[in-house]
Image (spheres, rainbow, N blue to C red):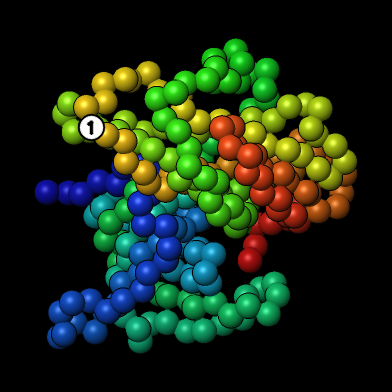
Amino acid sequence: MKKNLFNLFAILCLSLTMASCVDNEDPKQYLMGQFVIEGINPNYTLYAREGYVVHLDPTSVTSLTGTKGFGDNRRGYFQVNFNPDETEIKQAPTGNKNIMVIKNAELVAGEYVKVQSPMTWKVAESKNITVADSIFDVKKLGECWVHRGFLNIIHESYYSLNSNREGIFPTTSVVYKQESVKDNEITLDILYNRHTSKDASTSPATANFITAYDFNLLAQIVPGKDSIKVTLQIEGTDEKKVLKVGRDCNQY
């Protein structure tokens, strides 16, 4: 039976992991982590911010995704298997960072990370996204970073299971108020706690949730030519994080 990749924005394992396969007779290793997807079906390359460039075996992509490949998805959490003999260390195109290039990697499994577009506060209000909802609470704002054109935001939040033991997860949106947009500067509000289902039959648990945004769209919103100071704040806490991001952030 063919396996299928599917959309899921709750990622419980966030760090990149590399290890050897269990079979001692198999020299392959596996890599699990978050990647930016680039390329045209079925010839894709995955980029991890930790310094890995993974060229996928096209047949494994077709086997797992069918004829549509990754479609419009550009972020994902994947497991790939590879032969250590088909790797090499190179210097990144920009900076002094070394990267590991992996060739002919086998795509084994994965989940897509949803990429969203930031919206104005006015649009968010029209969609009732700014209305408080107490089903879920956020515990803290986690790591935030920009990699190859995507702003990635992690927050630790509560979630529950319904009577069918299906996860009820918070919905996350990033919005901005027009008055926060200045020369080379913007403040983003992270809104959560919006979900229509209230059928929670278990005590809430916590997990790390990740969402991604197209930073190039933000760069078009913010006037100026210098690097952009991005202030992230999450509704429900006093936490803030500040990033300074170059406008050309599509490379390492």
**Residue carrying label 1:** 202
The front one of 133 and 71 is: 133
- Around disc 1, counting alpha carbons within 10 Å, would you say few (fewer than 14), some (14 to 19), or many (20 or more)? few
Residue 40 location (% of width, % of height)? 46, 53
Residue 217 location (% of width, % of height)? 68, 39
- Decide if residue 188 is in sight here: yes
Q: Is residue 246 positioned above or below 158 on the image?
A: below
What amino acid is found at the position of numbered circle 1 in the picture?
Thr
Instruction: Identify the residue shown where x is 65% and y is 62%.
Output: 251
Horizontal side, residue 114 vs residue 227: left or right: left
Instruction: Identify the residue shown where x is 43% and y is 40%.
Output: 157
Horizontal side, residue 182 vs residue 30: left or right: right
Instruction: Identify the residue shown where x is 79% and y is 32%.
Output: 180
Horizontal side, residue 45 vs residue 218: left or right: left
The front one of 130 and 44 is: 130
Q: Is residue 18 positioned above or below 180 on the image?
A: below
Disc 1 element: loop
Number of numbered discs overlaid on the protein picture? 1
Residue 190 location (% of width, % of height)? 59, 35
Instruction: Identify the residue shown where x is 70% and y is 72%.
Output: 94
